[in-house]
Amino acid sequence: MSQYDTPRPESLGDGIHLIPAPLPFKSPPWVNTYAIETDSGLLLIDCGADWPEGRTALSEGFRALGLDEKAVHTILVSHLHPDHVGMADRLREEWGCRVVMHERAEQGRLAKYNDTPGYMAEMRELALRHGAPRPAVELAASAPRPWYMPVIEPPDHVVADGDPIDLGKGRHLLVLHTPGHDDSHICLRDSRTGILFSGDHILPRITPVVPFDSDSVDPLDDYLRSLRRLIDMRIGVTYPAHGSLIARGDERAYQILLHHDRRLLDMTEVVRKEDLSAFEVMLKSFRSDLDGLQIRLALLETIAHLEHLRLQGRIKGVERDGVLVYTR
Ligand SMILES: [Zn+2]
């Protein structure tokens, strides 16, 4: 499929190895997994969607780099999306390794990940409340569970913000809870090199979707705060989960902050001119030829921005016939 697009595996120095794994969809075309040498074997950050091409790419990647995949003792999951955690159970069984996630995984996030009908029911309710007409609701909230996304068993271990993950010889990965793209999202900072493994929190060129999510009052605020926190930490070299490596993570974080500032300003303008539901604002803010998944993500992203503006008092929300309408 998109395998020919996937870059070659590469040793990046400091005991860090990049093994890209192709994904069963067009965008993003692959996920970057990172194998890190530790005292007792290898630790793998993220593992890709559960499909044969992805599995083969991992095996071939380890082999090409002269590494033994069976030496992986830990899979560290950056967040609960299928392109990052999809293959975790398959590998846990094959390798006998442990799977580590942020503690939010145990506090309802994994249950949500595993419950597609429940998620779709929630989406349906949300889409109706935010003014989507019936056909759009059907399009956005009727998808079956993707075939590359098996149900995932609970993690063997969970980590919280500030936890060090020991790599041996006085080196560790510092866990940074960075909610926004997903409530269980973590970044990891290497104590030896200062390199940040940013998952989907900071990506080159594209900005991660920040979807409205009932597990948080204001997911966009969570996301922007997490970005500012990393800027304050003066992050430099950043290894993202998609795309090419980033030389200046702080500069990229600034660009992403600006992108959201602009979008917030644009949406404020739109709502100041006329009263609109989130669905109507979405139609004005995104291109019109979206498929079901894209409508769902665009609507969730629009709601996240409008709720952020409402909670900041920059716009208001009023209830009209069961639909939340945003107004000046
Ligand atoms: Zn991703």
Image (tube, grey):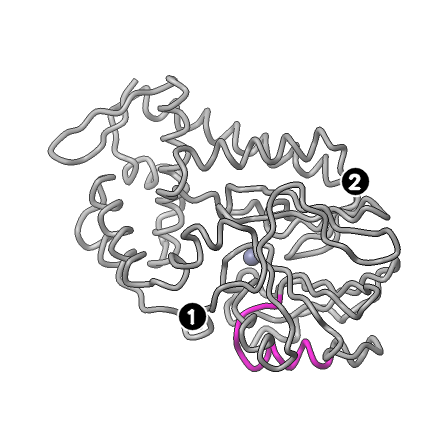
Is 15 left, or right, of 150 in this rendering?
right
Q: Position of residue 294 (x, y in %)?
A: 39, 54
Q: On the image, numbered disc 2 is attached to which residue? A: 236
Q: Residue at x 81, y 44 (%)?
A: 194
Q: Residue at x 36, y 68 (%)?
A: 145
The answer to which of 23 and 81 lies nearer the viewer is: 81
Query: Which region of the structure is painted magenta?
Result: 47-60
Give the quadrant of the N terminus. bottom right
The dot on residue 151 is: 1
The image quadrant that residue 74 belongs to is: bottom right
Amino acid found under the numbered disc labelled 1: Val
Is 56 left, or right, of 210 in this rendering?
right
The dot on residue 177 is: none
Q: Position of residue 274 (x, y in %)?
A: 26, 23
The image quadrant that residue 319 belongs to is: top left
Cα separation between marks 2 and 1: 36 Å
Amino acid found under the numbered disc labelled 2: Gly
Mark 2: give few (<14), some (14-19) or many (20+) Cα within 10 Å.
Answer: some
Q: Is residue 20 above or below residue 289?
A: below
Sequence-wise first label, 2 or 1 = 1
Examine the residues drawn in magenta and state their main secondary structure. Answer: helix
Q: Residue at x 68, y 64 (%)?
A: 33
C-beta proximity under 8 Å, tags 2 and 1: no
The quadrant of the picture showing ligand 1 is bottom right
The answer to which of 318 and 4 lies nearer the viewer is: 318
Disc 2 is placed on an element classified as loop
User: Is 45 part of what is drawn in magenta?
Assistant: no
Q: Position of residue 39 (x, y in %)?
A: 84, 65
